Amino acid sequence: MEEEWLSIAEVEKSTGIPDRTIRRYVAQHGHHLNTRKNHRNYMIARNAVNLLVQIRDQYARGRTSDQVEASLSENGVPMMITVAGEDALPVSLGEALTNLRQKLGDSLTLIGSEQHQMRKEMEFLRDELLEKLDQQEQLAKDMERERNRMLDFRDKELVHQVRKILETKRQPWWRKLSRQA
């Protein structure tokens, strides 16, 4: 249902409250009134007109601005805030908090979902990294075994050559000559 908006002049005609007084009420108690600004002019929702009359009556009884404000709060008059957006509609503070709570809940759900997805990716990457580390460790062991095998072969060959040299040194000199000839 479309909200009906009245200009200050229209509110003045319907309530008998002077233009300047309405502007003062909007300035002092606008957070309780469903208003919006249309360029330089205020527009007041039709349902806020009765509240303007109540405010005027309280001032007529000699109350101060603070007393009127306290009375409005005590009587449960909702505070209105304007939520910027396409239409910049004024809403009550309760509605705004409910909307904010809903959006915050949605955001937290989304964040939780993203965290869960990131956790899964991290686990996958950790498992992949562990697998690569295991492969590198196995490769290092294989290379060490091959190195040890080659060193053993080299050592055996060296020992064989040293024995061969020692055998030729133990032989008398005349045998060494006969072998060379």
Image (tube, rainbow, N blue to C red):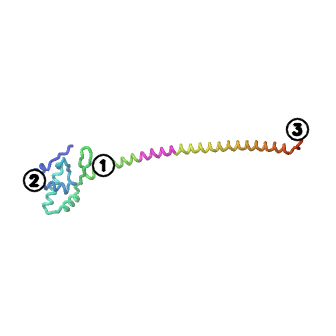
**Bounds of the magenta span?**
112-125
- Residue 18, percent from left and from top: 11, 54
- Dot 2, how many residues are within 10 Å of its Cα: few (below 14), some (14-19), or many (20+)? few
Q: Amino acid at mark 1?
A: Asn
Q: Residue at x 68, y 43 (%)?
A: 147
What's the mark number on residue 99? Answer: 1
Is residue 113 highlighted in magenta? yes
Q: Toward the viewer: 51 or 141?
A: 141
What's the mark number on residue 16? Answer: 2
Secondary structure, mark 2, is loop
| C-alpha distance separating marks 3 and 1 | 111 Å
- Residue 27, percent from left and from top: 19, 55
- Residue 81, percent from left and from top: 25, 52
Q: Toward the viewer: 84 or 54?
A: 84
- Is there a contact, CB below 8 Å, between mark 3 and mark 1? no
Q: Amino acid at mark 2?
A: Gly
Is residue 93 highlighted in magenta? no
Which quadrant of the view contains residue 85? top left
